Each structure stands twice: as structure tokens, then as C-alpha cells.
Amino acid sequence: METIFPALFLSLKVATCATLINLIFGTLTGYALAKCRFIGRDLLDTIFTLPMVLPPTVVGYYLLVLFGRQGALGQWLHNTFQINLIFTWQGAVLAAAVVTFPLIVKPARAAFENINPQLEQAARTLGLPEWAIFVRVTLPLAWRGILAGLLLAFARALGEFGATLMIAGSIPNETQTLSIAVYEAVQAGDDNLANQLVIIISAVCIVILWATQVLSKPRYQA
């Protein structure tokens, strides 16, 4: 229990923070890709999709290069704000947010693209500004797809391993998430602890996937 509860709490905290970050940036990115036409849009979409297909350790290496003490962003954060993300739980949040970013952008973009443009045009004819149309018309119509993506991203962030281990390490009670705790338990030959951790994370993911399937069903059945 001394290992299970800290790892579970940390995993939930990291997954929640990463999902909230992506709720904002992922939704706005999905909206921009769906509604805006600009040069390089397809290339940008490909770049945003990379964390979904690259090995997590590769993503973690890129993050180390960028946010390490010798990295451009890492040096700037340290020199300007005295912030160091390496081997911290905030670094684990960064890793989880980057890895799960495509899982929110893709469903959000699809949800925005499936909205009937005539509904938004009708709101424009009534004199609503674009921000009001987004908040009062577009988001309410796309929320099911966005929420489904958020649930998938949360489940993925909860079990993130490779990128988290690269940038945050495995410090008990500080950066050791559930998935890393499973790895450490197996390495130490503690099968009982590994079994408990695996059951917990599997149960949580099953519930989340079930909720995602329920949300993905059509609103009306014939």
C-alpha cells in the first residue's frame, strides 16, 4: 500500500493535468484545423499526429533535447523563471500531454468538421460574433466527440510509460507513476505488487473505455 497509493495519486494527478492542458490546446487546434484554410495545414496536422506513431522513448528523447538544461526551451525556462522540468512530476505532465495530444486533436477536428455549416451561418446572420458562435453553437454540437477524445487521452496518460520515464525518471513518491511502478515491481521480482498495480490500472482503463463507447454511440437509434 505504501507504493500503490502514492503511485495511483500521482498517476491521477498527472493524467488530470495533462488532459486539462489538452482540453484547451487540443480543442483549439482541432477547431483551427477543421475551420481554417492555410498553407501547410496538412503538414501541421502530420506533425501533431507524430506522438501517436513515434515510440514513446523517442518522444521522451525529443522532450529531453528541448527541455533539458542544455535545451533551448529548458535553458529559457530555467534562466527566466527558474523552472526545471526534468525529473519532476511537472515533467511527467509534459510528457503525458505531448503523447496524448493527438488523441484529442483528431476527435475534436472530426467533431467540428461534422457540424452542419448552415447552423453556424444562421448564427452569423443573427449578428453573433465569431467567439459567441464558437461558444454557443459550435462547442455544444461538438462536445460528444471532444469528450470521447478527452476520455481516451486520460486513459492513455494514466498508463504513459516511455516518455515519462525518459523525462521524469522513477523517483518513489515523486515521479513514479503506476506504469513505472509496475515496471519497477517486475524488475524487483515483486509479483504480488505488480499484480495489484496491473489490476488497478486495468480496471480504471476499462471503465474509461466503456464510457467512451457510450458517448460514441449515435444520439438517436432507429
Image (cartoon, grey):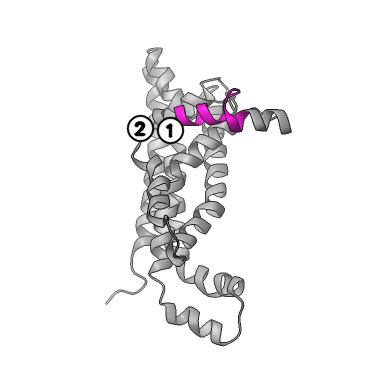
Residue 140 appearing in the image: yes
Q: Is residue 38 left or right of residue 88?
A: left
Residue drawn at 37 percent across, 13 percent down: 189
- The reply to whether the magenta stretch includes residue 168 is no
> Of the numbered discs in the image, which one, if any, rests on residue 59?
1
Query: Label 1 neighbourhood size at 10 Å, few (<14), some (14-19), many (20+)?
Result: many
Residue 96 pos. (x, y %):
49, 38
Callouts 1 and 2 close, C-beta under 8 Å: yes
Question: Which three-letter amino acid code belongs to the residue tagged 2?
Answer: Pro
Residue 87, image quadrant: top right
Instruction: Give the residue type that dot 1 points to.
Output: Val
Badge 2 marks a residue whose secondary structure is: loop
Examine the rendering and report whether any part of residue 152 can be seen.
Answer: no
Residue drawn where x is 55% and y is 20% of the image: 172
93 vs 127: above or below: above
Q: Nearer the viewer, residue 131 or 5?
A: 131
| Label 1: which secondary element | helix
Q: Which mark is residue 183?
A: none
Number of numbered discs visible in the structure rendering: 2
Picture layout, residue 146 above or below residue 57? below
Q: Which residues are magenta?
A: 61-74
| Residue occupying the point 41% across, 45% down | 47
The quarter in which the C terminus is drawn is bottom left
Prevailing secondary structure class for the magenta stretch in the rendered image? helix
Can you give x and y, in whole percent of width and height, for residue 119 in the image? 46, 81
CA gap between label 1 and label 2 equals: 7 Å
Considering depth in this image, is 150 or 8 the residue closer to the camera?
150
On the picture, is 32 further left or further right than 82?
left
> Looking at the picture, how far across and down is residue 91, in whole percent?
57, 31
Seen at 40% across and 43% down, the residue is 205
Q: Which residue is mark 2?
A: 55
Indicate whether residue 66 is drawn in magenta: yes
